[in-house]
Amino acid sequence: MIFGMTIFTFVHVVISLVGIGSGLVVVWGLITAKRLNAWTAIFLATTVATSVTGFFFPFERFLPSHAIGVLSLLVLAVAIVARYRFHFVGRWRVAYVLSSVIALYFNVFVLVVQLFGKVPALNAVAPTQSEPVFVVTQLVVLAVFIVIAIGGTIRFRVESARLQPV
């Protein structure tokens, strides 16, 4: 069972990292007004998979990570509907940008939590994850994503995105 869980954990982490990497490409596309269809599909699929697989780890009670997983699935549903059902029409463009950025933020938030929990040097400076260095790190990450959300909302326009090659 330990070996199986180790493989599952590895797969979950790889999916998460692919989701984060592809999500960074997608938000770059938002900021540069480019609709990157293939990257978007990879981002949305792997980010959904990350959230879903997170619920398959053994647990005895509902944890903050589960709340992030639920919230992530909710914003991903908005992004998927805005992109594939409503094709960015009207307010769905802003809904798509914001929900995509929020979904990526949730993944990066969890990445920072995991890094402080698993990397010895980071764990040494913030063992309880309530220390100022951890809080400041998370606030900087949040601030960066707020700037990305604002920039993406302003720059990403369906009209200009249609002119870009797919």
Image (cartoon, rainbow, N blue to C red):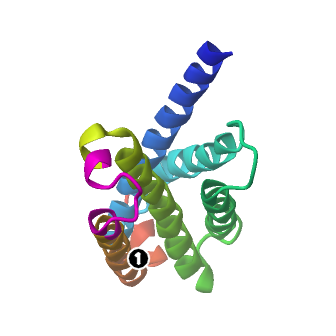
Q: Position of residue 14 (x, y in %)?
A: 47, 33
Task: From the top left corner, tell me how far across and down residue 72 is, in percent.
Answer: 62, 61
Image height of 128 relative to 121, above or below: below
Q: Secondary structure at mark 1?
A: helix
The three-letter amino acid code for the residue at tag 1 is Ala
Q: Is residue 32 visible?
A: no
The quadrant where residue 27 appears: bottom left
Instruction: Left or right? Give the position of 115 relative to 9.
Output: left
Q: Which residue is mark 1?
A: 149
Q: Which quarter of the picture shows residue 159?
A: bottom left
- Vertical comparison of 146 with 12: above or below: below
**Residue 124 part of the magenta segment:** yes
Residue 111 is covered by the magenta coloring: no
Range shown magenta: 123-135
Q: Is residue 147 left or right of residue 100?
A: left
Check disc 1: other Cα within 10 Å, few if <14, some if 14-19, many if 20+. many
